[in-house]
Amino acid sequence: MNSRTIHHLIKISIGNSEVSIDLPDELKNDSSYPVRGIALIGHPHPLMGGSKDNKVAQTLAKSLNLLAYVCVRPNFRGVGLSEGVFNDGIGEVDDMEQILQWMQTPSSWTELPEFANHAWVNHAAQLPYVLAGFSFGSYVNSQLTQRLNARGARPERLILVGSAAGKWDMPQIPTNSILIHGELDETITLQAVFDWVRSQEIVVHVIPDADHFFHRKLHLIRDTILGLWNAR
């Protein structure tokens, strides 16, 4: 993504998971910079060319970096150097949970030389965490949110872009979730998203004239997230 991005392989139950770790600008020159939290980001469908390098997934990371979060963008199983094969979203939820556990373990970070002197890693287990996802990644991380909620381990916030309503069995989501969709999404219709959240107290933030991949509209995803972050 840029000079603030570190590439790494994480060991999980299926083998290696390839991740990109995106850092706030401030951490480049100040290892004591007060990180606000950590964020885990899911990418679009692996069988349709989706990967951690998708532009919307990168935009989610950039937006959260600006809010002082350290972000991790994994490749789902079978993509890039991530081992395993596509598992219809079921195994992917398990994988993301294991990656989140890795992120919340201080020793995971200290094993990477880039983080040897970073003060925040000592408190990784106590830091707030955010889950975010685009398209298929929205399904995976909304399912993970539901699983964690059942254990009383609710994320600080859930961000869903181009939510997979009508394509996948999307669960109920927390009322403080940020839900962004393109007006002209040809893959997942805006009407399908409205139908999904109709019984929930969720606002859908619509980007005018945006298609599923938000061509020429990525900056509006960023601006929407930044504008809404402290609004409750």
Image (cartoon, helix red, strand yellow):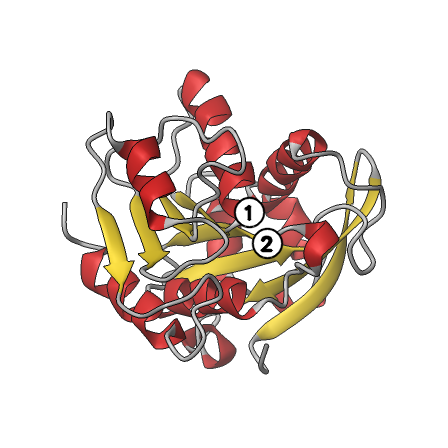
Residue density around tag 2, few if under 14, some if 14–19, many if 20 or more, within 10 Å: many
Q: Disc 2 residue type?
A: Pro
N-term-proximal mark, 1 vs 2: 2
For label 2, the SS is loop
Percent x, y of residue 208: 26, 67
The residue drawn where x is 55% and y is 41% is 104
Percent x, y of residue 69: 41, 59
Q: Disc 1 residue type?
A: Gly
Cβ–Cβ under 8 Å for marks 1 and 2: yes
Q: Is residue 79 left or right of residue 148?
A: right
The residue drawn where x is 67% and y is 29% is 90
Residue 106 at least partly seen: yes
Q: Quadrant of the C terminus?
A: top left
The residue drawn where x is 42% and y is 44% is 129
Which numbered tag is attached to residue 137?
Answer: 1
For label 1, the SS is helix
Closer to the camera, 76 or 2?
76
Residue farthest along the left direction in this orientation? 232
Tally of numbered discs: 2
The residue drawn where x is 74% and y is 61% is 8
